[in-house]
């Protein structure tokens, strides 16, 4: 007796090739999606790092202004500040006007300007080989040095010997698209010493 070998169906001859090509296309699309996701995560991490740099610079300049205020304040020491007040200043100023008098009428919009000119003390002290905040451009650089503005708020009604001050500071990160603004209210209590007595 003769045995017959089954013949493949003519329509199924290219099915393995088509299936393989479809699987290859799906795997390629998955690989491209993963690579795109990795690039997105890298950008997100960079943005978070830049935000933290801006916040740390603003906080550092605010801390400096608070310490400067403690060491340099005297009762009723304030100046009606304008853009000209900060053109050649080597230290912060205690302003009798708050940031609500700036062009933006708020501390939230930076840079702070009065009449189109910047206001505030640019905090960038020398440190070793250069300044603390590198503003020369390139990696690990800031778009601008942090800025500080100290405003006299007046006497505190709960304590007649106390005076309140508002300290605002802002800093860019690596570019002008990242900015941090911090604000604190600081109270200084003046006490009399000496003078003799019974």
Image: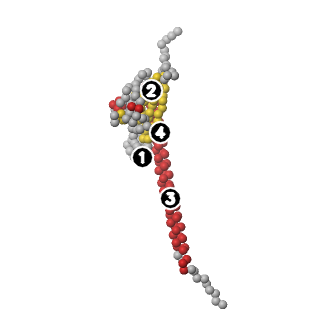
Q: Which color scheme did the rendering employ for the protein?
A: secondary structure
Q: Which mark is residue 153?
A: 2
Instruction: Give me the C-alpha separation between circle 2 and circle 4.
Output: 26 Å
Residue 46 place in picture, x, y as percent: 47, 48
Judging by the rendered image, the residue that carries numbered circle 4 is 56
**Residue 21 location in percent, x, y?**
51, 69
Q: Nearer the viewer, mark 3 or mark 2?
A: 2
Q: Which residue is mark 1?
A: 139
Residue, far top: 198
At horizontal 57% and vertical 80% (from top left) the residue drawn is 8
- How many angstroms separate mark 1 from mark 4 (CA)? 17 Å
SS type, badge 2: strand
Instruction: Report x, y in % for residue 184.
Output: 48, 32
The answer to whether the residues at label 2 and label 4 have Cβ atoms under 8 Å apart is no
- Which residue shows up at 52% across the image and 72% down it? 18
**What's the CA distance linking mark 2 and mark 1?**
39 Å
Q: Secondary structure at mark 4?
A: helix
Vertical arrangement, residue 30 with respect to residue 20, above or below:
above
In the foreground, 112 or 36? 112
Q: Nearer the observer, disc 2 or disc 1?
A: 2
Label 2 or label 4, whichever comes before in sequence order:
4
Contact (Cβ within 8 Å) of mark 1 with mark 4: no
Alpha-carbon span between mark 1 and mark 3 = 29 Å
Q: Which residue is drawn at the image coordinates 54% and 70% (left, top)?
A: 19
Residue 196 position within the rendered picture, expressed as x and y whole percent measured from the top left = 49, 11
Q: What crowding class fits label 4: few (fewer than 14 Cα within 10 Å), some (14-19), or many (20 or more)?
A: some
Mark 1 or 4, nearer chain start? 4
Asked where in the image residue 91 lies, by quadrant, the reply is: top left
| Badge number at residue 33 | 3
Label 1: few (<14), some or many (≥20) within 10 Å?
A: few
């Amino acid at each position: 007796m003769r045995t017959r070998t089954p013949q493949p169906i003519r329509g199924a001859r290219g099915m393995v090739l088509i299936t393989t090509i479809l699987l290859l296309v799906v795997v390629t699309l998955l690989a491209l999606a993963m690579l795109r996701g990795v690039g997105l995560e890298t950008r997100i991490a960079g943005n978070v790092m830049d935000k933290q740099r801006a916040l740390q610079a603003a906080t550092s300049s605010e801390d400096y202004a608070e310490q400067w205020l403690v060491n340099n304040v005297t009762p009723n020491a304030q100046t009606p500040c304008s853009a000209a007040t900060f053109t050649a200043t080597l230290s912060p100023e205690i302003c009798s006007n708050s940031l609500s008098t700036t062009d933006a009428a708020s501390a939230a919009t930076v840079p702070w300007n009065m009449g189109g000119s910047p206001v505030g003390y640019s905090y960038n002290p020398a440190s070793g080989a250069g300044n603390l905040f590198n503003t020369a451009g390139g990696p690990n650089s800031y778009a601008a040095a942090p800025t500080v503005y100290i405003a006299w708020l007046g006497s505190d009604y709960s304590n007649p010997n106390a005076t309140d001050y508002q300290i605002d500071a802002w800093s860019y990160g690596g570019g002008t698209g990242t900015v941090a603004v911090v604000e604190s209210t600081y109270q200084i209590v003046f006490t009399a010493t000496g003078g003799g007595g019974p």
